[in-house]
Amino acid sequence: MSGLLLIEQSLNGLQFGLMLFLLAAGLTLVFGIMDMINLAHGSMYMVGAFVAAWLVELTGSFLLGVVLAVPLTALFGMAMESTLLRTLYARDHLSQVLATFALILILNESVRMIWGSDLPLSAPAALAGPVELMPGLSYPAYRLLIIAVGLVLALALYGLVAHTRVGALVRAGASNR
């Protein structure tokens, strides 16, 4: 195995690990603070991705589509929380698992009915090509952006939870509801 291949695969692992971290961090915060098992958390990411792809297609701008998708997906999540998930807080964990698993199926089929199975999304020109990190090692710019955003969000989340009053309230809520 060459050293360049090892570096490339390490970057792939870091990128995939940061994506999993972002999903797991959301699940951990929701479960820790609200004592709610929400298996549909990943489906909300999927809804956000499809909304972003749809908005990119509508606006013609990758950045504008992504920026608009965040509040729209957040509004959808708040509506889902206030109408469905809130009714599950007092229920046992098995009920939460069953209800949110059903929500996964409902969201998956709803997305398929609205946008189909595949909504193409091309990376913007600035992120479409590879970046030469060192001689003989080119790595996709889009994956480097994912690594950078993931690291920034991980550090920001750590700073928020570990060093702010809001973080202290979150930790206190997780310890004693």
Image: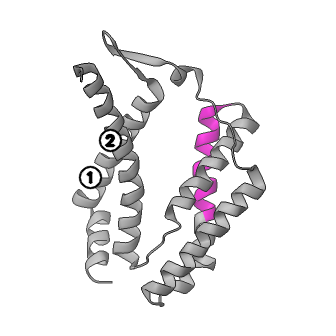
Left or right, 148 with reference to 90: left
Where 76 falls versus 71 (above or below)? below
The spot of residue 29 in percent (x, y) is: 37, 67
Q: Local crowd at mark 2 within 10 Å, few (<14), some, or many (≥20)?
A: some
Residue sitting at 28 percent across and 46 percent down?
Answer: 155
Instruction: Label 1, secondary structure: give it.
Output: helix
| Residue bearing the label numbered 2 | 151
Where 2 falls versus 54 (above or below)? above
Q: Quadrant of the C terminus?
A: bottom left
Q: Which residues are magenta?
A: 61-76
State how far apart marks 1 and 2 are (Cα). 12 Å
Q: Quadrant of residue 28?
A: bottom left
Q: What label sits on residue 122 in the rendered view?
A: none
Can residue 133 be found in the magenta stretch? Answer: no
Residue sitting at 64 percent across and 55 percent down?
Answer: 72
Q: The residue under label 2 is which amino acid type?
A: Leu
Q: The residue under label 1 is which amino acid type?
A: Gly
Residue sitting at 27 percent across and 53 percent down?
Answer: 158
Observer-nearest of 163 and 8? 8
Q: Quadrant of residue 100?
A: bottom right
| Residue bearing the label numbered 1 | 159
Q: How many marks?
A: 2
Left or right, 122 with reference to 151: right
